[in-house]
Amino acid sequence: MTVSTHVAAKTERLLNLVIALLATRMPLTKARIRAAVPQYQQTASLEAFDRMFERDKDELRELGIPLETQVVDVLFDDELGYRIDKREYALPEISFAPDEVAALALAARAWQQASLAGPAAAAMRKLRSAGVELDDTSLVGIEPIVRTTEEAFEPLRRAVVDRCAVTFGYRKAGGTSAVRRLQPWGLAQWHGRWYVSGLDLDREGPRVFRLSRIDTAVTRKGRPRAYDVPPDHDPGAMVASTQEARPATATALLRVRAGAGNLLRRRARTAVDRPEQPGWSVLTVDHDDVDRLADEVAGYGPDVVALEPLELRDAVVRRLTGARDRHDDRGATP
């Protein structure tokens, strides 16, 4: 069993235990708890169950869950039972500021692909039923930047492992694209962006390429184990040494539909509602990375339109076009 699988199984077992102890009005004996929690039923022996249950009890108490031990029958005070007092376990009535709601929704989204996806979704439904207004569409800009969503990441990772040369189309900062041939040495992240380092075969020297600017498929050329990586190569140090100081803040104009893009509205230097475009606002937003802002704008779909600069418009169009093409390639209806 892998570490992640073990953690998922333990999490599910603890959740089932909490549910069982919350659902009962009377204390549950260990025998009834073993019958109620599927993972306990699967233990090899009563001794194994006792050890697991004792560990789980300690963990629940460390988490602050009010697990009570009570006598099941006053006539037989040697038989103990367990329960969780709902009054102690339940949260008091609380309210959330907009930033706190955004943080809660972001946490739930972070668990969507993890073992707590179900409980996280249930928690958000409870917040909605309690009247808390959630703004899921405004979370695009505050999701963690550490990502590997670039399509080039996986083929380049395999090429690094196999020491196999590759070719790809690479778009410079100015917008022009050209085919590059590279012997990839390593992958590293810098300021939330992934880079590949290696030997540029056309320029016959070490180079660094940002993955988000690779605009074609990565194609392997030649056989594996065709070259050796310099023994002193440090991908992170090489990327850092080639990066200039963070660019000065630039300005972008965005047209945002009413009720959407709340995070963009918060960051906007100005926001203007134009009578000729009812239901839309034009925002002036400062940024220091066109690609990162393009990721954010594209994430809002049709609710945010990039107006200026042209480089930002083109970057957003490339992302939306790529998403459409991938959607069509999977056999979906356009």
Image (cartoon, rainbow, N blue to C red):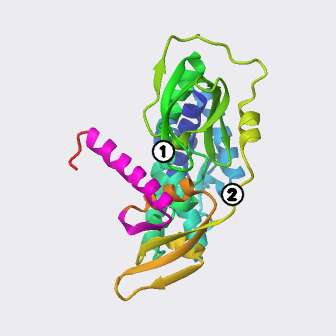
Q: What is the number of the mark on residue 247? A: 2
| Quadrant housing residue 128 | bottom left
How many neighbours does mark 2 have within 10 angstroms: few (below 14), some (14-19), or many (20 or more)? few
Residue at 66 percent across and 45 percent down: it is 57
Residue 104, given in percent of the width and then of the height, sits at: 56, 63
Eyeballing the image, is 256 above or below 139? below
- The answer to whether the residues at label 2 and label 1 have Cβ atoms under 8 Å apart is no
Residue under label 1, please give it: 113
Q: Give residue 146's position: percent from left, percent from top.
A: 61, 46
- Residue 316 is one of the magenta-drawn residues: yes
Neighbour class for label 1 at 10 Å: few (<14), some, many (≥20)?
few
For the record, the magenta segment spans 302-329
Residue at 44% across, 85% down: 273
**Mark 2: which amino acid?**
Pro
Which of these two is toward me, 44 or 302?
Answer: 302
On-image quarter of the N terminus: top right
Q: CA distance from mark 2 to mark 1?
A: 34 Å
Relative to 275, is 295 above or below? above
Question: Can you name the residue that lies furthest to the right here?
Answer: 232
Which of the 4 image quarters holds residue 327?
top left
What type of secondary structure mainly makes up the magenta span?
helix
Q: Secondary structure at mark 1?
A: loop
Along the horizontal axis of the image, is 235 left or right of 95? right
Q: Nearer the viewer, mark 2 or mark 1?
A: 2
Tell me the SS state at disc 2. Answer: loop
- Residue 11: percent from left, percent from top: 56, 42
Three-letter residue code for mark 1: Gln
Q: Position of residue 219 (x, y in %)?
A: 45, 25
In the current view of this chain or complex, which residue is farthest to the bottom?
275
Q: Is residue 26 visible?
A: no
Q: Is residue 247 visible?
A: yes
